[in-house]
Amino acid sequence: TSEEIEEGFSIQGADIGDSAEASRFEDSGQSFGTVILIDGSHSMEKEKPAVKRAVKGFIDGMGENDLAMIAIFNQPISPTKEPVVYGLDTGWTSNQAQLRSHLEDLMERESFRHKYTHLNQALNETITHIDEDSDSPVMRGILLLSDGADDVLPKNQRDYDQTYPPSLAKDRAIEKHVRISSVFYKSDPKEHRRGVLKTLSDATDGSMADADDSGQIRQ
């Protein structure tokens, strides 16, 4: 079975536990673009192999009209003044071999050792890119693989919260018609924030799944 996310489109449930297959967007003839956005912070380090397998499963399940790009985010040197998302410059593609190669490059380059997770900033940067990219399909979404933490160096917290208030990504996603679907990784009981991902997905008519579940993606 599948759950409708828009007329003519659906998210198809797939195993994302041990089999590590991510869900995918299916369409009925039109292009749907998905930015696969990977949390590359330290709290996700132990999930790196599972994330990699999940993204490969997503790529393997893409339809002939599906478009995707893969990006990863981590801690910048100077919060709010530098981009935290890497990989958006590769552009949309339906070429699965190209996506697999890009995934390998990103996962090899990123150390997953940065302590802080600038989740809200990463989502805002991604939404801006989707909105301003003239090649973006009308139907588009973000597939976020994360533990939901959103934290910064304490001395930078005030500036971060002023620049990226908690509701900003959600509100902009709604405004720009970008659906956010999430795969939640329970990486560290002290750091993970499942509720953050559920709120984002529910508010944008996306879907959410737990990475340790092997059932279908459900809201």
Image (tube, rainbow, N blue to C red):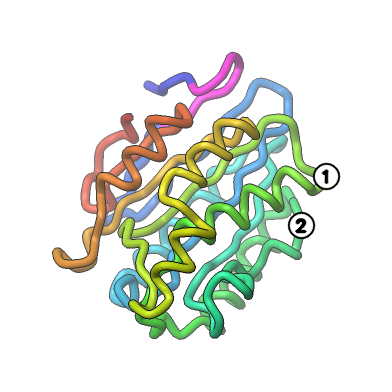
Front residue (pair 159, 131): 159
Q: Tag 2, which secondary structure?
A: loop
For the question of whether residue 56 can be seen, the reply is: no
In the picture of the structure, the residue carrying the numbered disc 2 is 91
Q: Is residue 10 magenta?
A: yes
Q: Is residue 30 left or right of residue 39?
A: right
For the stretch drawn in magenta, what is the main secondary structure? strand
- Magenta residue check for 58: no
Q: Quadrant of the C terminus?
A: top left
Q: Residue furthest left?
A: 189
Which amino acid type corresponds to the residue marked 2 in the rendered image?
Gly
Instruction: Report the side of 64 relative to 16 (left or right).
Output: right
Q: Are marks 2 and 1 in contact (CB under 8 Å)?
A: yes
**Residue 195: percent from the left, percent from the top?**
26, 44
Residue 118: give x, y in percent of width and height. Answer: 45, 66
Q: Which residue is mark 1?
A: 135
Q: Is residue 76 left or right of residue 192?
A: right
- Counting from the top left corner in percent of width and height, residue 30 is at 73, 26
Residue at the extreme top of the image, as rendered: 7
Q: Quadrant of residue 209?
A: top left
Q: Amino acid at mark 1?
A: Asp
Q: Local crowd at mark 1 within 10 Å, few (<14), some, or many (≥20)?
A: few
Please, is residue 117 above or below residue 214 in the view?
Answer: below
The residue depicted at 33 percent of the width and 77 percent of the height is 154
Distance (Cα) linking label 2 and label 1: 8 Å
> Residue placed at 39% from the left, 85% from the top?
113
Residue at the location (32% across, 39% down)? Answer: 198
Q: Is residue 174 left or right of residue 197?
A: right
Bounds of the magenta span?
5-12
What residue is rendered at 72% in x and 32% in y? 31
Q: In the image, residue 184 lies at what x, y percent?
A: 31, 52
Q: Is residue 14 visible?
A: yes
